[in-house]
Image: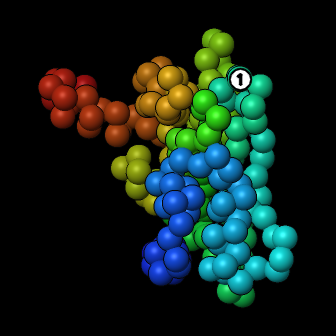
Amino acid sequence: MRAALLLCALALPATAATADVLQGSSPDPLGELSTLYSAICQWEPGTQIPADQINMTRDGVPDYLLRFDMPCRGQDNAFAGTMGMATQIWVSRAGTYTRILDANLHDIRLETREERQFVIIQHAGGFCMTADAAPCFLTLEFTDNALIWAEARHQHPSMTARLQLLERAEGGTEND
């Protein structure tokens, strides 16, 4: 369904603003995305994508967590499936917003540990190399206006198998 929506979006007349928001940059991501998807999904006038204000950048300008828990063309939960719900994080930066996360997730949590900001995302188990039905948690750290993989000590135990495989691929030992 998401691929079909993207194709519909590409069929719309492209304005510079629409092109930028699709590329992950916008002075008003909530307004631009709501306008774009309103046309695609045929929403009632005034319908907005649900957004939570968060404080990732700590610059006094709200940042946004968007969960696309919305219908589209009469289909409830059109932006959700077995891999989770379409989710985005937009952070303020020098008068504009940058998208730092765009993924289908089962869940998302924001935490502060040791005065550092973390985003814990829940994927399907296959991401952690287990059964898809098993929960898989990845911890990302927000630093330099981007999300990076957090150190192994901050990862959930469900991530162990994937981390061991990555370590071996990077030249670690076979007997980890």
User: Is 98 positioned to the left or the right of 126 in the image?
Assistant: right
Q: Position of residue 127 (x, y in %)?
A: 41, 51
- The image quadrant that residue 76 belongs to is bottom right
Q: Which colouring convention does the figure follow?
A: rainbow
Residue at image x 43%, y 24%?
A: 152
Q: Position of residue 121 (x, y in %)?
A: 57, 43
Q: Position of residue 126 (x, y in %)?
A: 40, 55
Tell me if I can see residue 126 in this picture: yes
Report the amino acid beneath label 1.
Asp
Q: Looking at the image, which is closer to me, 69 or 45?
A: 45
Q: Position of residue 171 (x, y in %)?
A: 15, 25
Tell me if I can see residue 22 in this picture: no
- The image quadrant that residue 81 belongs to is bottom right
Q: Looking at the image, which is closer to me, 38 or 110?
A: 38
**Residue extending furthest toward the bottom:** 74
Image position of 68 with respect to 4: above or below: above
In the picture, the quarter occupied by the C terminus is: top left
Image position of 125 with respect to 39: above or below: above
Q: Residues within 10 Å of mark 1 (few under 14, many from 20)?
A: few
- Element assignment for label 1: loop
User: Is 72 positioned to the left or the right of 146 in the image?
Assistant: right
Q: Looking at the image, which is closer to me, 120 or 132?
A: 120
How many numbered tags mark residues here?
1
Residue at image x 36%, y 50%?
A: 129
Residue at image x 50%, y 33%?
A: 147
Image position of 75 with respect to 19: above or below: below
Which residue is under mark 1?
A: 59
Residue at image x 61%, y 30%?
A: 94
